Image (cartoon, grey):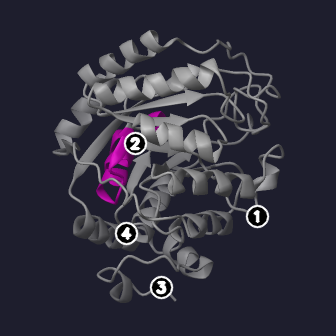
Amino acid sequence: MFNSSNHIYSEIRFDWHKQEILEILNLPLIDLMWEAQIVHRKFNKYKVQLASLYSVKTGGCEEDCSYCSQSIYSASQIKSHPQFEVEAVLKRAKAAKEEGADRFCMGWAWREIREGKPFNSMLEMVKGVRELGMEACVTAGMLTDDQALKLANAGLTAYNHNLDTSPEYYENIITTRTYQDRLDTIKRVRNAGINVCCGGIIGLGENQGDRASFLEVLSNMNPHPESVPINSLVAIEGTGLEDNKQIDSLEMIRMIAAARILMPKSKIRLSAGRESLTKEAQILCLQCGANSIFYGDELLTTSNPSFQDDRKLLKDIGVIFNKDFEYCDKTVTYL
């Protein structure tokens, strides 16, 4: 059984069990938030990292993720476009930096990284973003060991590859890639010395046990992912989950708080679906553990609060922008 007195001030753990996590998720919300805030204050400062996300290549993905409008299996009205060129992407990165972002995340709607000119352009984009003094993150599907090493040599800060949901529920959402495929990709990223950005989505139709199982996988990675995006489903017309109801904001707060307790030093990123949260709900997420947000008017194919709204919110509550990112130990291998 989870006992806060045994855990809050102990060393960071990598041996969490599903039942323990389920008990944390089901704590009375006031108690859960209190426990999470104690952990957050012990291991972090109230600084928020601002990350800007840009879709370099949109649509046409061969995966059948049922939540995604970029899938070729989706009937959504999204307009696909080919990959933007290096100069255009770096221009966007510079604009994001001028707006206050210190991390620039680039997305390619691919099942796996394409070799040749597309990959060479990706490497140039990574180098260019780093030369701007920003952190560079890429999400582009599966990759090889060689590609991971080349990205590391280009200066890539982090690679995003989400697990999405629990191992048990996964096949209800995606059939074109296995859960093990995702874990293998994360292993390649880690072994190349690149920081891991790995999270998931709530509101896919999963139950509380699935959420606990998903968090169990993440929290037993050693080291923990440096960045853990927690998304809530944005149901898009034409996708397989278009009829799913929007989750209650309290569910997002619970997930953020539980993730903070389980992974005390990770950046817990309040991600997709934030636009549907009230100002007060966002403040509670920040209070109980979220210390990174996606910053900008659009997240790949969904909308997001504006730069101006986010700056005002952070200033109003006294949260400062985070300029300190802890890089992973390059000698650590994935376990």
Q: Is residue 282 positioned above or below 12 on the image?
A: above
The local secondary structure at tag 1 comes to loop
**Which residue, given by chain and number where applicable, does mark 2 sit on?**
157
Q: Position of residue 24 (x, y in %)?
A: 49, 75
Name the residue type under label 2. Thr
First to last magenta residue range: 273-293
User: Who comes first in sequence, dot 2 or dot 3?
Assistant: 3
Q: Residues within 10 Å of mark 2 (few under 14, many from 20)?
A: many
Contact (CB < 8 A) between labels 3 and 4? no
Which numbered disc, 2 or 1, marks the residue closer to the eye?
2
User: Who comes first in sequence, dot 2 or dot 1?
Assistant: 2
Which numbered disc, 4 or 2, marks the residue closer to the eye?
2
**Which residue, given by chain and number where applicable, does mark 4 sit on?**
30
User: Who comes first in sequence, dot 3 or dot 4?
Assistant: 3
Name the residue type under label 4. Ile
Residue at image coords 44%, 10%:
88
Which numbered disc, 3 or 4, marks the residue closer to the eye?
3
Residue at image coords 64%, 12%:
81
Q: Is residue 175 positioned above or below 12 on the image?
A: above
- The span from disc 4 to disc 2 (Cα, nearest Å) is 36 Å
